[in-house]
Each structure stands twice: as structure tokens, then as C-alpha cells.
Amino acid sequence: MIEALIAGHLMGDASRRMDKTGREFIVARVLARSKGDEEFIVNVIAFDDAACAALLTLADGDALSLTGALSPKVWTDKQGNARPSLDLVAARVLALTAGV
């Protein structure tokens, strides 16, 4: 696990989920770019109340920064190609809005 700071844009709206014990959490996807313009999709999950509330105020395409525990992974697409995947457990979320 890596402590990370990620900046990007929300892909779709964040959504509420509930685990088997009834605990609510938020999931979202963020499109982030490297310095070389390589794109990464970051799968985000938030349990912290403040992070959950911040994610729910955002809409598709909004800019944001997140901090938290990052886990790099690899998945295989339908053509058999290995693709990188990033999972982030968000500790803090900062919405980047115009005029602020």
C-alpha cells in the first residue's frame, strides 16, 4: 500500500453503497493523467464521513484531489492484455472548483 495524492476528474457520479453489516460507503472513479499524458482510472472507495460527503457533492467531470492508501493492481482485458489498475481508499477529498 502506498500513501498517495491523486488529482484528476470524476468519471460519472459517485454512488452510495452499503456493506453486509449496513455500513454505508461511497465509490467513485477518477481519471488521472501522468506527466506523459498517460491516463489512469483510479477506483475510489471512501468510508470517512467528510470524504464521503465531499465526493457526493461532485458531478461527472469535476476536478478533485484525493489522498489515501493506494494499491496498484493489474487486470487482464478481453484481448488478454495486462492493464494497470489503481485502487484508492480515500482519506481526504478536495474539490477543485472555478473561482476559488
Image: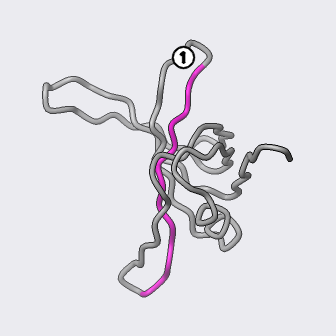
Q: Residue at x 51, y 50 (%)?
A: 60
Where's residue 39, x and y in %? 47, 25
Image quadrant in which you'd find residue 98: top right
Image quadrant in which you'd find residue 4: top right
Image quadrant in which you'd find residue 6: top right
Above or below for 79 versus 23: above
Where's residue 5, x and y in %? 68, 40
What is the secondary structure assignment of the residue under circle 1? loop
Q: Residue at x 58, y 22 (%)?
A: 34
Above or below for 86 versus 90: above
Above or below for 22 versus 45: below
Above or below for 94 versus 46: above
Q: Is residue 24 magenta?
A: yes
Q: Which residue is mark 1?
A: 37
Where's residue 3, x and y in %? 66, 43
Q: Residue at x 48, y 55 (%)?
A: 28
Q: Residue furthest top?
A: 36
Q: Amino acid at mark 1?
A: Asp
Q: Main secondary structure of the magenta part?
A: strand
Give the quarter of the figure containing the N terminus: top right
Where's residue 65, x and y in %? 68, 44
Q: Which residues are magenta?
A: 22-34
Using residue 99 as the reference point, say whether residue 8 is left or right of it: left
Q: Residue furthest bottom?
A: 22
